Image (cartoon, rainbow, N blue to C red):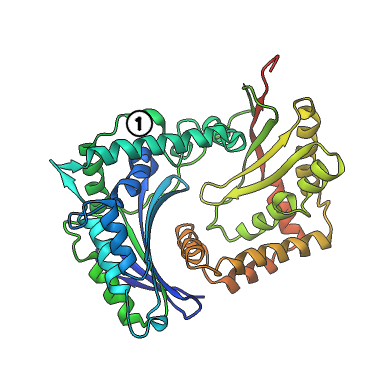
C-alpha cells in the first residue's frame, strides 16, 4: 500500500491509493481544526451538513439520490487527533468494473461537493429544526459516553491530568457549549472551517492517477477565498511535582482505575518504535504483563491494558476492578512497569509483541477507511507511512532500547472511580 501525494489548491492535498483490492471507490475529505476552536460545533457539523443540500433539501431526497448511484454511502464523523479535531466526510460508490460500464463515481463526488459547499441554508443559517434535532442527538451521544464508565474514567483522567491544555477538551465537545449553538453560529463556523482548515482528500480505488486528481479538483473547485492555517504542534504538558491522585464516587458496581504517564518522546522521535514495543510488552496484548499478572495470575481486574498517544507523548493504563482491590491492583500495575525498567521480560515476549504489532499494521490496509485513517494519522504524527518501513523499524528495537523507553515513563496522575457508600 502506498498513497501518492499531490498538492491541489492552497492548503489542500490529494492522497491516492490505486488498487483493485476493493469493489468500491472511496472518497474521504478530512478537515483539521484546533479543539479549542469549538469542538462541539465541529462535532455537530457533519451531522447537520449531511442532511440535505440546496438542490436536495430533504434527507429523503438525498437518500434517493444515493440509491440512484447504486447505493452509494455518504457518512460524516469527527475524531480527536492530539489537540486537533478532524471533521470527516466520506462517500463510497460501487466500482465501475462491476456495473457493466456504469460509473457512479462522478455523481457521488458531485453529491459530496453539494453537501460540503452547497448545503441547505435558511435566512443565513442552517435549517433550525435540523440543528435542534442534531443537538439533541449529540447530547445523547455524550451522555452515552458518560454512561460508559470505562470511557468516563478515561475522560476524567485526561481532564485532570491535562487541565488547562487543549488536549483535555473532549472529542465531541462539552454539553454547555453545544446547548449555546445556533443555526447562524454553526453556519458561520462552517464557513470559517472551509476557509482556514487544511484539507486532505483521500481516494482509494481502481482508477488512474489523472482521474483521481480530476475528481479531487472538481470536488474542491467551489472553494474560494482560502486562507489555510498550518496545524500547530501539541502544547507541552505541565508535569506535577508529585503524582496526583483523584477519586470520584458514583453508584457503580465496578471500580475504574486509570493511570496517566508522561514519556520522553513523541511519535516523530527516532526512538519512538522502542516506546511502541515497550507499551506492547507492558499492556497492549493478551500476552502482555498487565493482562497476565493483573487479570490472569492475581484475578484483580476484569480488564487491564495500556496505550500511548504519540502526538502528545503520553501513556495511559485502564483497568476495571473490585473496589476493595484498588491498593493491590495499583501496586501490581506500577510494579509491572518497574519490571520493564529492570529489563524483566523475555525474548519470547518481545517476539510475541512484534508479531502482534505487525499483524495490526498489516490489517490496517484491509479496508479503505482503515487504510485512509492510518495513513492520515501517521502523516499528522510525522511517522513513516509505509507498512514495511514501520515493521522494519520495530524489528531494529532491542531489549536495551525497550528498557530505556520504560525508564523514561513517569507516573503523572492516578484516577479512581469508586462506588458510593451504601450503593
Residue at 38% in and 40% down: 39
Q: Is residue 378 above or below residue 407?
A: below
In this orientation, does residue 133 appear?
yes
Q: Nearer the viewer, residue 157 or 55?
A: 55
Q: Is residue 295 above or below residue 356?
A: above
Q: Nearer the viewer, residue 119 or 292?
A: 119
* Residue 177 appears left or right of 334: left
- State the SS at label 1: helix
User: Which quadrant holds the C terminus?
Assistant: top right
Q: Nearer the viewer, residue 29 or 127?
A: 127
Residue that extends furthest to the bottom in the rendered view of this protein: 100
Residue that extends furthest to the right in the rendered view of this protein: 297
Residue 308's x, y, as percent? 60, 49
Residue that extends furthest to the left in the rendered view of this protein: 123
Q: Which residue is mark 1?
A: 177
In this orientation, does residue 169 appear?
no
Residue 273's x, y, as percent? 63, 60
Residue at 28% in and 57% down: 62
Q: Nearer the viewer, residue 302 or 319?
A: 302
Q: Is residue 374 above or below residue 411?
A: below
Residue that extends furthest to the top in the rendered view of this protein: 422
Q: How many marks?
A: 1
* Residue 372 appears left or right of 158: left
Residue at 76% in and 45% down: 290
Residue 263's x, y, as percent? 62, 45
At label 1, counting other C-alpha atoms closer than 10 Å, the crowd grade (few under 14, some 14-19, many 20 or more) is: few
* Residue 341 appears left or right of 240: right
Residue at 58% in and 51% down: 265
Residue 315's x, y, as percent? 62, 45
Amino acid at each position: 500500500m502506498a498513497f501518492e501525494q499531490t498538492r491541489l489548491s492552497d492548503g489542500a492535498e490529494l492522497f491516492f491509493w490505486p488498487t483493485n483490492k476493493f469493489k468500491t471507490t472511496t472518497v474521504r475529505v478530512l478537515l483539521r481544526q484546533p479543539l479549542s476552536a469549538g469542538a462541539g460545533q465541529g462535532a455537530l457539523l457533519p451531522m447537520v451538513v449531511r442532511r440535505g443540500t440546496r438542490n436536495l433539501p430533504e434527507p429523503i431526497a438525498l437518500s434517493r439520490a444515493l440509491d440512484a448511484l447504486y447505493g452509494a454511502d455518504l457518512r460524516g464523523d469527527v475524531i480527536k487527533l492530539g489537540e486537533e479535531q478532524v471533521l470527516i466526510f466520506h462517500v463510497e460508490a460501487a466500482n465501475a468494473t462491476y456495473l457493466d460500464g456504469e460509473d457512479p463515481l462522478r455523481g457521488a463526488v458531485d453529491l459530496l461537493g453539494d453537501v460540503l459547499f452547497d448545503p441547505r441554508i435558511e435566512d443565513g443559517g442552517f435549517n433550525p429544526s435540523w440543528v435542534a434535532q442534531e443537538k439533541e442527538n449529540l447530547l445523547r451521544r455524550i451522555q452515552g459516553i458518560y454512561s460508559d464508565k470505562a470511557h468516563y474514567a478515561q475522560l476524567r483522567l485526561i481532564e485532570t491530568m491535562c487541565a488547562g491544555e487543549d488536549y483535555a477538551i473532549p472529542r465531541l465537545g462539552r454539553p454547555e457549549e453545544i446547548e449555546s449553538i445556533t443555526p447562524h453560529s454553526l453556519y458561520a463556523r462552517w464557513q470559517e472551517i472551509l476557509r482556514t482548515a487544511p484539507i486532505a482528500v483521500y481516494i482509494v480505488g481502481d482508477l488512474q492517477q489523472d482521474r483521481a486528481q480530476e475528481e479531487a479538483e472538481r470536488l474542491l473547485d467551489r472553494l474560494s477565498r482560502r486562507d489555510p492555517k498550518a496545524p500547530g504542534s501539541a502544547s507541552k504538558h505541565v508535569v506535577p511535582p508529585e503524582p496526583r491522585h483523584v477519586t470520584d464516587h458514583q453508584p457503580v458496581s465496578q471500580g475504574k482505575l486509570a493511570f496517566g504517564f508522561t514519556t520522553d518522546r513523541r511519535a516523530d522521535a527516532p526512538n519512538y518504535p522502542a516506546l511502541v514495543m515497550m507499551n506492547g510488552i507492558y499492556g497492549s496484548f493478551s500476552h502482555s504483563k498487565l493482562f497476565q499478572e493483573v487479570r490472569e495470575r492475581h484475578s484483580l481486574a476484569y480488564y487491564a491494558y495500556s496505550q500511548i498517544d504519540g502526538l502528545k507523548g503520553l501513556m495511559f493504563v485502564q483497568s476495571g476492578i473490585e473496589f476493595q482491590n484498588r491498593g493491590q491492583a495499583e501496586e501490581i500495575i506500577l510494579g509491572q512497569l518497574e519490571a520493564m525498567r529492570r529489563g524483566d521480560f523475555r525474548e519470547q515476549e518481545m517476539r510475541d509483541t512484534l508479531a502482534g504489532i505487525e499483524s495490526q499494521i498489516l490489517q490496517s490496509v484491509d479496508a479503505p477507511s482503515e487504510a485512509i485513517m492510518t495513513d492520515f494519522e501517521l502523516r499528522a504524527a510525522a511517522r513513516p507511512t509505509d507498512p514495511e518501513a514501520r515493521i522494519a523499524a520495530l524489528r531494529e528495537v532491542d531489549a536495551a532500547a525497550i528498557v530505556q523507553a520504560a525508564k523514561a515513563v513517569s507516573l503523572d496522575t492516578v484516577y479512581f472511580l469508586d462506588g458510593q457508600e451504601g450503593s
